[in-house]
Image (cartoon, rainbow, N blue to C red):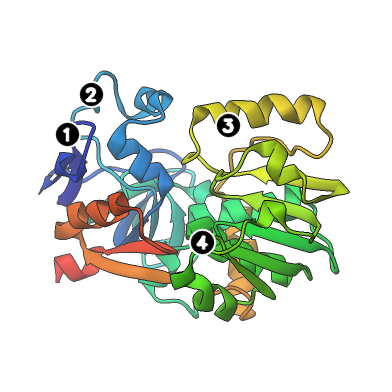
Amino acid sequence: MNAIVQTGYGSADVMEYRQVDKPVPGEGEVLVRVMAASLAAGEYFGMRGRPFPIRFYIGFPKPKPGFVQGIDFAGVVESIGSGVTDFRPGDEVYGECHGSCAEFAVAKAGSIAPKPRSLSFEQAAAVPTSACTALQALRDHGRVRPGQKVLINGASGGVGTFAVQIAKALGAEVTGVCSTRNVEMVRSIGADHVIDYTKEDFTKGSARYDVILDNVGSHSLSDTRRVLEPDGLLLPSSGHAGMGWVIAAAISSVFVRQQGPVFVAVTDTENLLALRELIEAGKVTPVIDRTYPLSETARAFEYLDEGHARAKVVISVAASAA
C-alpha cells in the first residue's frame, strides 16, 4: 500500500511517499481503508522533532524505520480483529489511529466511532483530535455554562474553530482572537465578538472573561489571567508557545487558582459520539483550509510550516487511490 513515511526530522523533505506493508489488526483493533486524514499540530511537531520529548514516540535519534505519519482519519472498516463487537466490515467510521497518512491503517476499537452521516470523509477526518481537545477543554476542564463569557485565543486554528462552535453550543458568549484575514471566518462560525490581534491586544482590554482557552501562548500567563473574572480560568492548549510556557502553566496550576491544568485530550468513542451528536444537530461544522492528495502530503506539511494555515489541512487518500 502507499503511505507517507517520515525518514528524519526537519523540513517537509523528510516526508516520503512510498510503498509499505499493509497492516494487520490485532485483538481489539480494526483495519480501516482510509478515505481521508488530517494534519494537526502533533504531526507538525513530529516533523520538526520538537518539542524534543516527541522523539521518544516517533524514534530517537531518528524516526523508527517505516514510521507512517498521521493520527486523525475517516474511512471504511475493512476487517476486524478478535474481540471487536461494535464494528463490522463496511462501517463508515472516524477517529484516531497510528499512521493515518496511508491507504490502510489499524485503529483501536475504543478510538473510533460511526462517522457523522452529514459529513464527507474529508470533513470527518478534520474532526477527531482538534475537536476532542476543544470539547474536553471547555466542557470538562472549563465547565462552561450558559451565559458565561469565553475567549478563544487562536480562534481560526484547528482547535480554535471547533472551540468557538462548542462554546456557543454550551451557551456561552464567545470572543474569538485571530488575525485580520480570519476575522470574517471566525464570525461566520458563531463568535459573538472578534478581536483582530494585529490591531488590539486583548490582554489590555477592559472586558473580563470566565474562561480563556489559549491555543497560541502569545502572551505571558500572568498577562492573560489579568482579563479573567476573579473566579475565571485560563486553559493552556498550545505547544507552539514552547516547553517553557507549558511548564510554567503546569507549575502555576498548582499555586494559582485561575490557572487551569495542562491536559492531554483523549480521542475515544465516547467523545467522538458526543461530537457526532453536535455535528448532526448542526451545532458544529468542520472548517477546512486546504485539501491535498496523499501523494502530495509533503506539500501539505510545507504549507503548515509557512505558519499561515487556518482551521484544518486535509489529506484525501481516496483521491490518490483513484
Front position among marks 3 and 2: 3
Q: Which label's residue is closer to the chain start, 3 or 1?
A: 1
Question: Which mark is in front, 4 or 2?
Answer: 4
For the C terminus, the image quarter is: bottom left
Q: Residue 137: x and y, percent?
A: 67, 50
- Upstream in the sequence, badge 3 or badge 2? 2
| Marks 1 and 2 close (CB-CB < 8 Å) | yes
Query: How far, Cα to Cα, is label 3 from label 4?
Result: 24 Å
Q: Earlier in the sequence, mark 1 or mark 2?
A: 1
Which label sits in the foreground, 1 or 4?
Answer: 4
Which residue is depicted at the point 66% across and 32% down? 249
Q: Which numbered circle lies on residue 198?
A: 4
Foreground residue among 259 and 183 = 183
| Residue receiving disc 2 | 62
What residue appears at the point 80 percent right and 53 percent down from the top-left corner? 143
Residue 139 in which image quadrant = bottom right
Q: Which of 303 and 70 lies nearest the eye of the viewer? A: 303
Q: Amino acid at mark 3?
A: Val
* Label 4 packing within 10 angstroms: few (<14), some (14-19), many (20+): few
Residue that numbered label 1 is attached to: 7
Label 3 element class: helix
**Few, some or many residues within 10 Å of mark 1 (<14, 14–19, 20+):** some
| Residue on which the image places disc 3 | 246
Question: SS of the residue at dot 1?
Answer: loop
Structural distance between the alpha carbons of marks 4 and 2: 38 Å
